Structures are given as structure tokens and as C-alpha cells.
Amino acid sequence: MRIDIITVLPEMFTGLVDCSILKRAQNKNLVEIVLHNLRDYTTNKHRNVDDYPFGGEAGMVLQIEPIDNAISSLKLQREYDEIIYTSPDGEVFNQGIANQMSSYQNIIILCGHYKGIDYRIREHLITREISIGDYVLTGGELAAAVMTDAIVRLIPGAIGDEQSALSDSFQDNLLAPPVYTRPAEYKGWRVPDILLSGHQAKIDDWKLQQSMERTERLRPDLLDKKD
Ligand code: ADE
């Protein structure tokens, strides 16, 4: 998979896309994450990529030309499954969307900034608009990083033990069961006996019960989505 990220702040991704699972997935050639500085696509000699909005609103708007140049030059090189714009008014990102996108070959993520981008980009070039939650960030960079992380960890082979992605919270619209490790007792706080019993079928049963109980208590809305 290839993820092209178009941003005015490529430096914000340093340390996010080059460590841990994202780094390993790139080293294993499971994913290529390519950052593009939007300023490299402007013909403006001062490398400005924003301008005042028509109609007198406060704030600056990213211009159409550098964004069109960036997207067009990428589209000349390969086909994209989706051209995504990160925006608080987009469809709210979730595990289902991450699953779907992890099967794609190529995606572009355009990070919004300032007051937004010239709306014609959204009308003519963007295929999907995604929000990571009902709050406003300074820009779309953190949203792009969150999406990239959630997507890449689902690519087969990205996580050592593939089971561990399948048993994530939300994967089945259920929260994951609690996990414990050694020591079995600490300050008198004991790990549930069932987990030490060695009875795998009973342990699996317990985990499912725990998942159901935690979901009912903490995220009952997820049970409505369960088929
Ligand atoms: N840009 C600003 N806020 C955002 C959000 N919540 N999700 C995606 N992009 C954003």
C-alpha cells in the first residue's frame, strides 16, 4: 500500500510515521508513506499557499492551484482508490473505515489547514472527507497521522501476531476484554483465576463475556451496530 500525505507541515509527521509499527511496516515494504510539502507545488515565488477568503471571513484559506498541482501530479503516476480530505465536518473515522482502507493500494490524504481549503477542491477532486471526532484541531495533520496508524496496523504482517489485530476493540463492535501479565498477584491484586486455569475453551468464554459486559457498560451504542 502507498499513502501520499499532502501537508503544509510535513515536519509534524516526524516521529509519528517513523517509529514503532509504522516504521516496521515500511521496513517490511508493506506500506510506503510519502510526505509532500504543499509549498513545493506552488508557482508563487514566496511559496505562499494560502490567501484571504472571498466574502470577508476571518482566517486564511488554502489555495486551489497548489493543491490541484499536487493531486494531479500524483494521479499522473498511479491510480488512487481514494483522495481523502481531513476535516471536522467529514464522516467520522472508525474501525470499519480503517479496515476498508487497509485493503486499498493507493490513497492520498490531504491535510486541511487554517480556515479550510478552497471548496472547489472538495467539490471536484476529493472523493472522501474524514473527521477523527467532533472537535476542531489546528490542522488535519494529526488526523492524517491517526488514520495512517489505524490503517497500517491492519495490513496483514504489520503486527507480529495477526491475531492481535483481529482481537482489537471495535473489530467486532465489541470492546476488547481485559489483559494481564505476570506477576499473577501484586500487592494482593490477583489476576482472574480463570486465566491461570489452562482451560482454553473456558478462557475464551470468559473473554467473550467480559467483552460483552464491558461493551454494555461502557459503549452500549456499539451493540446496536452489531449484526
Ligand atoms: N481538522 C481539524 N479538526 C479535524 C478533525 N476533528 N478531524 C479531521 N480533521 C480535522
Image (tube, rainbow, N blue to C red):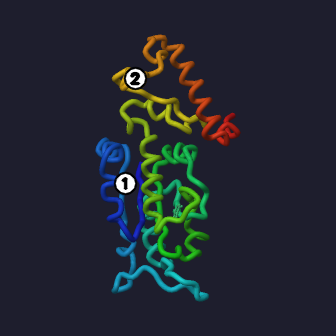
Which quarter of the rendered picture does the C terminus lie within? top right
Q: Is residue 62 above or below residue 26?
A: below
Tag 1: amino acid:
Ile
- The residue shown at (39%, 82%) is 48
Spatial distance from mark 1 to mark 2, Cα to Cα?
A: 47 Å
The residue that disc 1 covers is 33
Q: Position of residue 129 (x, y in %)?
A: 57, 61
Q: Is residue 25 left or right of residue 143?
A: left
| Disc on the earlier residue, 1 or 2 | 1
Observer-nearest of 224 and 215: 215
Observer-nearest of 224 and 124: 224
SS at circle 2 = loop
Observer-nearest of 223 and 103: 223
- The residue shown at (46%, 18%) is 195
**Circle on res. 102:** none
Q: Quick check: marks 1 and 2 in contact, CB under 8 Å?
A: no
The residue that disc 2 covers is 188
Q: Is residue 108 above or below residue 73?
A: above
Tag 2: amino acid:
Gly
Q: Is residue 130 above or below residue 170?
A: below
Q: Position of residue 214 (x, y in %)?
A: 59, 33
Q: Is residue 37 left or right of residue 222?
A: left
Local packing at callout 1 (Cα closer than 10 Å; few below 14, some 14-19, many 20+) is many
- Comparing marks 1 and 2, which lies closer to the viewer? 2
